Image (cartoon, helix red, strand yellow):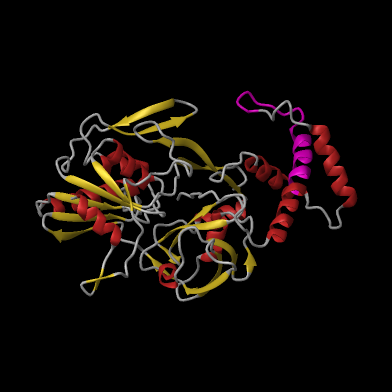
């Protein structure tokens, strides 16, 4: 499960500043005390494969701040365990990385129980902008879509509880719940002047990850809603997804398509190995799919090494503000290898890969360990998202011969 970020300008109005400041103060308190206690526990303890705290860490300053808090703070300070967890959250927070976080043992249990491919909730993918959790993707026909939630909406409260500073990993556990139960989400939208409440009834969320439509005249639209799938028996989720993709390709080829529209709108991403597998269906041998960068191996190029069945078909890709991660990799691979035009709106810009690292006490790190670059070497980020060749606003309610139509799809079909 990935979490994405859309950065906001510094002068964009943010609600509930006072509450958020209180959260920051609490974090500072926990951080300071946690460092002090953590240092005591480390004295004389060292192993050959352990990294030490930085030598230039200002222990005296930290001790001074802790003393000031201890002598002046009106409330009782948290105990040792809570302070230690505050230290860890402070270290991870010091990375200034919106995609890396630390979960306590209890938070870890809640998180792992809420990340299945089938779940009961409102049907959104969440991101974080450093201060608030936001909605990055709204799943089609979900309670959130029917209620009118939009990408980039900031979540300021869930069931009346302030959400300032609460990360997506934790807020998701509050938003999800048993089907047919209600949840109230308070949203701040940049185009509005005040927050707004949305009350939705949770339901089972189970999206068909891949399907296709015959649009006639030799054009087929393949919808990829996410690059994930649940395990099946001994098969991993990646194997299940790839098998489903193979079946879609087999069915599409029976239609003898001349052109294909790949619809990645609202696709939050998923397995990197699966997006590579899909890209190979269209790319020529040895063309670069993507580049990966990490601390161990540096930068490497991932190239096509499989004979695809759709290499001779003309392609257009649809993206929007909810397209992220793996879907951005596919769009860039086809666009920058001059195999497809991209139509729609700029994407999220989430070009990092995270891994879950269990800690001995049952807590967990969610840590960025790899960056993704496009074939031409551009880092995918909120500053450098995938930019369409044809930027088109989505309008589904315009009348054309008495029917509703999709303006982005219409533009895509013009290119074919």
Magenta segment: 30-51
Which residue lies at the image location 21% right of the left edge and 50% below the top edge? 415
- Counting from the top left corner in percent of width and height, residue 139 is at 39, 62
Q: Position of residue 123 (x, y in %)?
A: 43, 64
Residue 236 visible in the displayed image: no
Answer yes or no: is residue 195 visible: yes
Q: Is residue 172 left or right of residue 241?
A: right
From the viewer's side, name the closer residue of 111 and 398.
398
406 within the magenta span: no
71 on left or right of 55? right
Whether 35 is among the magenta residues is yes
The total number of labels drawn is 0
At 67% from the left and 43% from the top, the residue drawn is: 88
Image-quadrant location for residue 298: top left
Vertical order, 148 against 351 (above or below): below
Task: Decide if residue 335 is on the left or right side of residue 258.
Answer: right
Residue displayed at 34% across by 47% down: 388
Q: In the displayed image of the protein, which residue is found farthest to the right?
A: 71
* Res 393 quadrant in image: bottom left
């Amino acid at each position: 499960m990935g979490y994405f970020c859309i950065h906001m300008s510094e002068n964009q109005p943010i609600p509930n500043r006072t509450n958020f400041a209180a959260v920051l103060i609490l974090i500072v308190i926990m951080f300071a005390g946690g460092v002090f206690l953590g240092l005591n526990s480390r004295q004389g303890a060292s192993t050959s494969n352990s990294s030490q705290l930085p030598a230039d860490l200002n222990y005296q300053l930290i001790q001074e701040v802790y003393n000031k808090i201890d002598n002046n703070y009106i409330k009782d300070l948290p105990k040792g365990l809570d302070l230690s967890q505050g230290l860890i959250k402070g270290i991870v927070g010091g990375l200034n990385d919106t995609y890396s976080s630390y979960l306590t043992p209890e938070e870890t249990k809640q998180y792992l129980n809420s990340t299945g491919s089938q779940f009961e909730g409102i049907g959104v993918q969440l991101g974080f902008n450093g201060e608030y959790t936001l909605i990055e993707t709204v799943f089609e026909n979900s309670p959130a879509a029917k209620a009118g939630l939009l990408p980039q909406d900031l979540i300021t409260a869930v069931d009346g509880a302030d959400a300032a500073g609460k990360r997506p990993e934790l807020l998701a556990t509050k938003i999800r719940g048993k089907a047919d139960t209600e949840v109230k989400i308070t949203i701040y939208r940049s185009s509005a002047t005040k927050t707004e409440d949305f009350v939705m009834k949770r339901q089972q969320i189970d999206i068909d990850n891949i399907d296709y439509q015959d649009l006639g005249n030799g054009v087929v639209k393949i919808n990829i809603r996410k690059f994930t799938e649940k395990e099946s028996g001994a098969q991993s989720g990646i194997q299940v997804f790839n098998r489903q993709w193979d079946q879609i390709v087999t069915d599409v080829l029976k239609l003898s398509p001349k052109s294909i529209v790949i619809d990645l709108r609202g696709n939050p991403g998923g397995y990197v190995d699966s997006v590579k597998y899909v890209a190979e269906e269209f790319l020529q041998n040895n063309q670069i799919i993507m580049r990966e960068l990490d601390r161990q191996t540096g930068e490497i190029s991932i190239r096509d090494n499989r004979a695809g069945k759709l290499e001779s078909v003309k392609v257009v890709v649809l993206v929007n503000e909810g397209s992220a991660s793996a879907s951005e990799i596919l769009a860039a691979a086809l666009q920058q290898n001059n195999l497809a035009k991209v139509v729609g709106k700029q994407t999220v810009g989430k070009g990092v890969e995270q891994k879950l690292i269990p800690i001995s006490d049952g807590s967990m790190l969610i840590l960025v360990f790899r960056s993704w670059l496009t074939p031409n070497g551009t880092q995918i980020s909120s500053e450098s998202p995938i930019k369409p060749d044809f930027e088109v606003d989505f309008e589904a309610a315009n009348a054309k011969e008495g029917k509703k139509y999709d303006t982005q799809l219409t533009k895509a079909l013009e290119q074919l």
